[in-house]
Image (tube, helix red, strand yellow):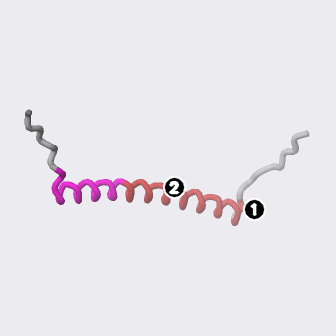
Amino acid sequence: MSATTRPERESAPQRRAFWLKTLHQWHWISSALCLISLLLFAATGITLNHAARIEAKPVTIT
């Protein structure tokens, strides 16, 4: 019967490094999404609060 070696479990520092890398990536992605949302919210707020300064002519589609 041949002896089969089981793969050793990852050491604690390797698991910690994996989770820190994953957390760092998620943090970057979530902050980018928040920035985009904040810029969109700011742009809509500016256009709503300063509607008189933005020239536009109403168009009626029939």
On the rendered structure, is 25 left or right of 42? left
Q: Which residue lies furthest to the bottom in this view?
A: 49
Who is closer to the viewer here, 23 or 53? 23
Relative depth, front residue between 10 and 7 = 7
Return the x and y of residue 15 as percentages of the image width and height: 23, 56
Residue ID at (60%, 61%): 41
Mark 2 crowd level (few <14, some 14–19, many ≥20, 10 Å Cα): few
Q: Residue furthest left?
A: 2
State the image quarter where residue 29 is shown: bottom left
Q: Is residue 20 left or right of residue 28?
A: left
Classify mark 2: helix, strand or loop: helix
Q: Where is residue 36 in the image (x, y as percent from the top left)?
A: 51, 55
Q: Is residue 17 left or right of residue 41?
A: left
Residue under label 1, please give it. Answer: 52
Q: Which residue occupies 54% across, 61% down?
A: 38
Image location (x, y in percent) of residue 30: 44, 57
Is-magenta flag for residue 21? yes
Residue under label 2: 36
Q: What stretch is highlighted in magenta?
A: 9-25
Quadrant containing the N terminus is: top left
Q: Which residue lies furthest to the top in this view?
A: 1
Q: Where does residue 54 sit, x and y in percent of width and height?
A: 71, 56
Name the kind of residue labelled 1 in the image: Ala
Of circles 1 and 2, the one toward us is 2
**Picture residue at 18% right of the left edge, 59% below the top:** 12
Mark 1 Cα-neighbour bin, 10 Å: few <14, some 14–19, many ≥20: few
Q: Disc number at residue 18?
A: none
Between 2 and 45, the one lying in front of the other is: 2
- Magenta residues: mostly which secondary structure? helix
In the rendered image, which quarter is residue 43 located in? bottom right
Identity, as a three-letter code, of the amino acid under mark 2: Ile
First along the sequence among labels 1 and 2: 2
